[in-house]
Structure formats: C-alpha cells, structure tokens
Image (cartoon, rainbow, N blue to C red):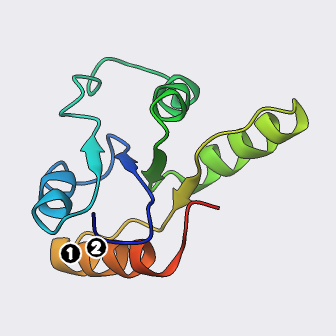
Amino acid sequence: MSGLGIALFTDEDVHAPLAPALRRLGYDAESCQEAGRSNRRISDEVHLIYATERGRAILTFNVVDFVALDHHWKAAGRTHAGIIVAPEITDFRELLRRVVLHLNTYSPE
C-alpha cells in the first residue's frame, strides 16, 4: 500500500473518480458513491460513523460542518479515524496531487 497508512473514505461532495484513481496508485480509498451512499440524504455524522467503523479517515470539502462535528465528537469523548477537510478543489489533477501529498506526509496517528 502506498502512503503512510491512512485508509480514506471520500465524502459525496468530493469527485467520485478520486478514490479509484488513488487505488490505481496503490492507496486504500473508497468513495461515497462506490459505497452506495450518495444522493440518499445521509447526514454528515452518519457518513463519519460509516468511515469510522471501517477505520477510514473521511475527506470532505465541507469544512464548516465537519469541523463542528469533530468538536462535538471530541466533547463527547468519541474518536474517529480522522477528518481531512479541504477547500473545494475543482481541478481533478490538482486534487489528486494534493491528496497524494497528504497521504504521503501524514500517518494515521
């Protein structure tokens, strides 16, 4: 597996082809779309629970909601596998480059 060991789950607002592109490069990634969880009005917290149960950090462009969710979980003594928030990057190649850089720079801890 490439990177430093972060398994990734991409939120539904992240480009669906990102996870397959990451897997082709050797990373462990699953998209919301591949999991059959897109366009179903699933709450951010339920997506985070899904990712956490599978040991995956969630990648999202939804900075405001997920930062608040992280604070809520920490206040309640709950843990998750990580939340990676980023401003929306519309250029797919640039998004892929930045995610790969992150996965090669940060460990799951």
The quadrant of the image that shows the C terminus is bottom right
Numbered mark located on residue 6 in the image: none
Residue 21 rendering spot, x and y as whole percentages = 13, 62
Numbered mark located on residue 91 in the image: 1
Near-viewer residue (32 or 51): 51
Identify the amino acid type marked 1. Asp
Query: Which residue is disc 2 drawn over?
Result: 95
Rendered image quadrant of residue 98: bottom left
For label 2, the SS is helix
Q: In the image, what residue occupies the spot 27% across and 28% down?
A: 38
Q: From what the image shows, is residue 37 above or below residue 24?
A: above
Alpha carbon distance from label 2 to label 1: 6 Å
Near-viewer residue (40 or 17): 17
Q: From what the image shows, is residue 88 above or below residue 62?
A: below
Q: From what the image shows, is residue 97 above or below residue 96?
A: below
For label 1, the SS is loop
Whether pointer 2 and pointer 1 mark residues with C-beta atoms closer than 8 Å, the reply is yes
